[in-house]
Each structure stands twice: as structure tokens, then as C-alpha cells.
Image (tube, rainbow, N blue to C red):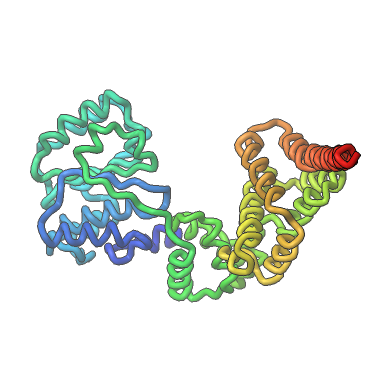
Amino acid sequence: MVQYQSIYRKWRPQFFEDVVGQKHITRTLINAIKLNRITHAYIFSGPRGVGKTTTARILAKSLNCQEGPTDHPCNKCSQCIRINSGQSIDVVEIDGASNRGIDEIRELRSKIGFAPAEGKYKVYIIDEVHMLTNEAFNALLKTLEEPPSQVLFVFATTSPQKVPNTILSRCQCFYFRRISIEEIVNKLKKILEEEKLNIDPQSLYLIAESATGSMRDAESILDQVITFSEEQITYDNVKEILGVIPKRLFLQLFQAITARDTKSGIVLIDQLVQEGVDLHQFVQDMIVYIHQLSLIKILGEKGNHVSMFGENDFKQLLELASISDLKTITDTIAELNQIEDKIKYHHYPWILMELMIVKLTQVKKQNQEKDSSDTVSYTHLRAHETVLDLV
């Protein structure tokens, strides 16, 4: 029986040109190989799933290919095949989270002095390098100061700010950016064409947006959707897999806030609880919804830059923007931001939602009435002063 290979592994880039959304990095590395300007240590930082470890493997392959060093490895020689399968003894991948102590780094240092067994370079790829202890970093520092000529380090991290400056200053640092929705969609289209599968554009964009800039996450979601849908992939299937919350709920809740209708807002929260909706996800998605509303309020029809809002949703947002004031919109975003972190771990998350509704409806309503009363009192006072002046 042939073992199934997940999409993100099957479609992992094999050449620098295949890495999506990181041309500013791949071009620099290609030129460095062509000009023989490879340094001894690199730091690849950025969000998860954007190509850090993949690029490190391609770099290792380019340097150790039998036709290399080359910016376009052959993928046919024994070195390329071994590196692709993770079996090369000259390319060592280390998980910084589970090998973070000084003993592990000392063991690594004891092996660094040996010449490569098969290729031209020994490449050490340390993932999540920021997880190393201070003692481990100090042990590594001596090696980075006087590295053997045949050794190359690539440190990958999602938190470069946690890496000591003494390490950063001895490395070339590259920041991997989040991948745009369009770039993710284009890559998914190519995969689907090769896999001979059909999917509508709206579903593709929904997958891309849910991946939040991570190509690996997008491919994993696509894999899950294909498995769930079997032969026919539909938009409803994608929404069910992703747990997408209907936008009408955000519309109804904000309408209640705008109308200062506390009862309707609390009834809607109760409905969400009864239906088992993830309230943390609801808050996150509503922030996106209200943010989009704020853009439409300010920019009009030009504000629709998020493709997850279809034509009907956009029309509703336009109507909502026309009857909403900007202060209510910004106040709602501020309150949602306040409870976003708390609601994930709160034992009674709906209480935070209900308190938010009360604050945005009752308190604002009382403030409005107070302001109105103050305005009336001021008007009466000015009228009285005017009469006295005439007398």
C-alpha cells in the first residue's frame, strides 16, 4: 500500500524560484551563490509556514549538489535526493525547542570540526533557535566567531527579538513576510490543476484568507477540504471545515449596538452560546467585520478590499455604514480588542460578551441622554442671560 503524502509535503518547493512570496530573499541567495559570497551564518525569521525551513533546505541542496554550488540544484544526484528525503548526514536539522540546552550545543560543537562526509558543506539548520537557553547561545557564540570554512549555519525563528544581539550581529538576517492572499490563491490553483480537482474562486479565497499569510496552513486546509468533500468541493464544505461564522450574526449584533438595544444584543449572545459557537473566534471575526465597516464608512465603495465579503455582504455593509457613526464603530472595535485575549481563557466567556453589550448600549445611551440634557440646560441658560441683557 502506497503511503499518502500530505499536500504541503508533496508540493514543498524544490528550487528558489518555487518559494512563494519571498523574492527579496531568494534573489539575494541566488546572487550570493553565483558570486561566491556565501556567509557562514544566516537567520531566517518570520511567521510560521512562510518558507523559512524550506529555503534553508534549498540552500543546503544548492551548495552540496554534485553540479554545484549552483543556484538551481539538479534534484537528481545522490546528494540532492538524500537532502530531499532528510537522509543526508551533511545536512543536520535540529529542533531548538527540544534541544535547547548547553549539552546539546556542546555535542554539536564537537562534531563541527569534521569535514563533510559526502558534500562540500556541513549545513546545520536550527529551527526555533530563540528557544535555546542563554548558556547554549554562549556556547554557540564561540563557533560563530571562528567557524570552520566548510560549515554553514541557518537559524530559523518566529521570534527574532528573543535571539541575543551577540548572535544576530554575526549572522545575515532575512525577514520572511506573510504571503499575500493573491499569491496563496495562485499557488493553490496550480496544485488543484495538477491534482485534477475543481474548486470555485470564492472557496479558494476563503481558504487563503483563513491561512493568514501562511502557505503551509493554506495547503493543510486544502488537504482537509479535499478529504472532507471527496469529489465535489463546494463553498459550504469549506465554510463547514473552517467553522466560518455567518456574517448575518455580526450584522445583527452591530445593529443592536447602533440602536442601543441591549435586550436584542444579549438574546443574540445567548443564541450563540446555545448553538455552541466559539466566542473567541466570533470576537476575532467580528473585529475583521467592524474593521471592514470602518473602511467603508471612510472610503465608501473603495473600502471593500477583503474578498471574503461578497456582493450581498458588501451591500449590507454599505447600508450599515450609512446609518452608523464613526465613534460607535471605533468604540466597538476598542471593546472587542479589550476582551479578545481574556475571552479565550475565561470560564464564562459569554459574560464578557454580555458586559460588552451593556457597556456599548446602556452606558453610551445614558451618556447621550446626559449630553442632550446638558445641551438643553445650556440653551435655557443662554436664553435667560439674553433676557437679562435686554432688561
| Residue 233 position by quadrant | bottom right
- Give whichever of 104, 371 is nearer the camera: 371
Would residue 201 be seen by someone viewing this image from the given angle? yes
| Residue 154 position by quadrant | top left
Image quarter where the N terminus lies is bottom left
Residue 173 at what x, y percent from top left?
Answer: 26, 46
Q: Is residue 40 left or right of residue 101?
A: left
Q: Is residue 218 left or right of residue 352?
A: left
- Give whichever of 68, 178 is nearer the camera: 178
Would residue 4 be seen by someone viewing this image from the given angle? no
- Give whichever of 143, 80 is nearer the camera: 143
Q: What residue do we see at 78% from left, 48% from top?
A: 257
Count how many numbered circles sit on residues in the image: 0
Image quarter where the C terminus lies is top right
Residue 107 at what x, y percent from top left?
Answer: 21, 29
Residue 112 at what x, y percent from top left?
Answer: 14, 37
Residue 140 at what x, y percent from top left?
Answer: 21, 31
Q: What residue do we see at 74% from left, 65% from top?
A: 319
